[in-house]
Image (spheres, rainbow, N blue to C red):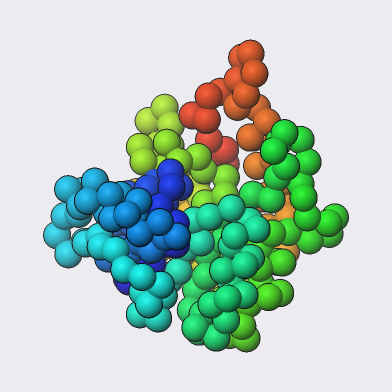
Amino acid sequence: MQITIIGAGNMARGIATRALAGGHTVTLTAKDPAKAARLAEELSAQAAGDAAVRTDDDSAVDTAELVVLAVPFAAAKELTTSLGGRLSGKVLVDISNPVGTSLDALVVAPGTSAAEEIAAVAAPGTKVVKAFNTTFATTLVAGQVGGTPLDVFIAGDDEAAREQVAELVTSGGLHAVDVGSLKHARELEGFQLLHMALQIGEGGYGWASTIKLVAP
């Protein structure tokens, strides 16, 4: 699969690592091209078989099958607006958590979510999917916590788009959990707010924990 990741930070690193493990082609594009180039160079050693990683300007969006917005919520919403019709027909993955700097509240209105706000400004035909917002960057690089593969919760209104994101997840050695329609991004963002709050302070988990669904 041709995957374009917009962003070159820690989450871009983590998602690209999983995509390369799954044999996908990854193109990184970022506001700072030099940072994207450095990340691509670091990740290139992990590309095995048909997998590959490279950098490009935002023209990589046009050739992508799946576009990942590995940026904060406000930037993700702005990018979705500015890219407009170029995203039509593509799967657009929102990984953001719309939280305040103190990690004690969501900044979106009750009854909505970051993913739904992004979908509202997206061009017709853009298939917005919420995923990876409950996984921290360091755990994505490792692919597991305590020897257990990460769960990646996936929400979206287009079933085929959810399946495409699930393919990215499972091919990278993780466990996909399809939670259904995009409105469930509200719950995903809500319980990640709590998960994030638990990372800091005395006795915190140090951004190394994960949320796992365990079935009998």
Q: Position of residue 180 (x, y in %)?
A: 64, 64
Q: Residue at x 61, y 14 (%)?
A: 203
In the image, 73 versus 181, the foreground residue is 73
Q: Is residue 108 visible?
A: yes
Residue 143 position (above or below residue 44): above
Q: Residue at x 71, y 74 (%)?
A: 120
Q: Residue at x 37, y 48 (%)?
A: 13
The answer to which image quadrant residue 100 occupies is top right
Q: Residue furthest top?
A: 202
Residue 191 position (above or below residue 109): above
Q: Position of residue 185 (x, y in %)?
A: 68, 58
In the image, 19 versus 84, the foreground residue is 84
Horizontal arrangement in the rendering, residue 116 relative to residue 2 (left or right): right
Image quarter hosting the C terminus: top right
Image quarter hosting the N terminus: bottom left
Horizontal arrangement in the rendering, residue 79 relative to residue 173 (left or right): right
